[in-house]
Amino acid sequence: MTITRTTAAILLATVFCAARLSADDPAELTRRGVQLSTEKKFDDAARQFDRAIEIQDQASAKTYHNKGWVRELKGDFPGALKNYEEAIRRNPKQLPSYERSGYLYYKTADYDRAVAAGEYVIKADPNNAEVIKWLPEAYKMKLLKQQEELLAKQREEERKRKEEEERRRAEEKKQAEKKDEEKKPSRILYATWDFTLRSAYYFDGGDFKYVTTSGIPVSLPNMLYVSFMPTPSWEFDLLAGTPHLGALMPGVAAYTERFQVMYHMDKWFLGVGVLGSHYKDDFNYGKELTLHDIKVGAVLGFSDEKSTTKITAYPRYLPQDTSHSSGRTLDVGFMEFSYRYDVDKYLGYYSRISAADYYFFDHRNRVSNYYGVYELSLGLVLGKYDDATKQKFLTFTIDITERFYLLDLANDEPYRFANGQGLFGADSSTWFKGDAFPGYYTNGHVFSVKAEEQINRYFFVYQKI
């Protein structure tokens, strides 16, 4: 009986162990969960499934840990961490995975996560001998990193504060300038009148002599300019007087007037005008004659806070003297391009290109005389401001001009295009004969300095040498 009871006990133990193994098998747990589901014992079925998942995760967590260890031995720290983290996700109680991931966080300078993992291991296993090797250093490096991040944050905040302060000051300056500009009365009338006293040195006499200029009504180079803007959109300009066209230019224009009407559209402006030219002298026809010419032209320009560009055109073709004209006539053409740029309120520069053509026709004899003056100018403007009034009170302008004189007399083909008259003296009949510009005469160089002084709010005076 004793033997029989012992055998039974062994069998019972064997059966119990087999049943125990079968009860912890994920496949068996899954089968039982399905069976319980069919019996509508859903909560019991869910618990069976959860247990199966738990057993599977615990088994796979060890596999992920071992895979991470292999990656770590190969030096692939990112790959190792990925597997250690997956092992922890599957089995949050698997301390070796915390231990190894914490060490790799420490080695890759992720001190916050290293400290968190190390503290978790020490709390669960106070006698852990591996974590204690690097955890104190991780604490130290975490503190240093926090200090660096704090300093970097403070520097960034200081940089942003300075930028904000600069923006605020710039905005305040802009608003102050805008208020100052609003306080200034809008310009309604601007007018200048200038005249020139000419003297020349004569080598034969060894002395300076006053030089007169044939003009109407006085023989003195002078020019009146008036700009009237009754509204911000409309501008009326008048330029009238006896022009000075250079020392080598005869009195081809005793008087000229130009009246223009311009319409301003924000930054662009467009206008039309009339140019009148008047001749009164005797050097063209052997006796004194008075001739007049009227031209219609246009103005196009662009202006912003810094620059102004302007194109003025009075072509001789509007209208033009042709072979159908009779008697003796004057024909004038004028073109100008100007550009100005203000670097700031103290410094600016400009450039100007102009072309003035004067044709004197004798239609009865089919001949013409031509005089032209083309100019290329570059200038620098220096301004000085009063600190109290914030207004410019003194301006210096330095100008360099290259002047080209054109001359073609007694041309017996007065109506042919490119006949040596106009177009910089180009002549199509001599283009391939080595003399493409027979109308070019000579050129001159002009250097001038102008000082402009503000007398009061409404008047200024300038001198130019």
Image (tube, helix red, strand yellow):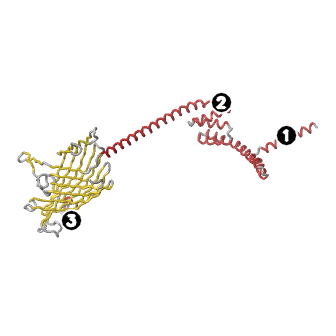
Residue 210 position in % (x across, y down): 9, 48
- Circle 3 — which element? loop
Quadrant of the image containing the C terminus: top left
Residue located beneath label 3 in the image: 319
Q: Nearer the viewer, residue 461 or 110?
A: 461
Precedes in sequence: disc 3 or disc 2: 2
Precedes in sequence: disc 3 or disc 1: 1
Quadrant of the image containing the N terminus: top right
Residue 13: assigned label: 1
Residue located beneath label 2 in the image: 129
Real-space Cα separation, disc 3 to disc 2, in angstroms: 107 Å
Can you tell which quarter of the image residue 457 is in?
Answer: top left
Residue 10 appears in the figure: yes
Q: Residue at x 29, y 51 (%)?
A: 308
| Front label number (3 vs 1) | 3
| For residue 51, side relative to residue 181 (left or right) | right
Precedes in sequence: disc 2 or disc 1: 1
Real-space Cα separation, disc 2 to disc 1, in angstroms: 40 Å
| For residue 423, side relative to residue 153 (left or right) | left
- Circle 1 — which element? helix
Residue 438 appears in the figure: no
| Front label number (3 vs 2) | 3
Residue 250 position in % (x across, y down): 12, 56
Can you tell which quarter of the image residue 6 is in?
Answer: top right
For this orientation, the residue located farthest to the right is 1
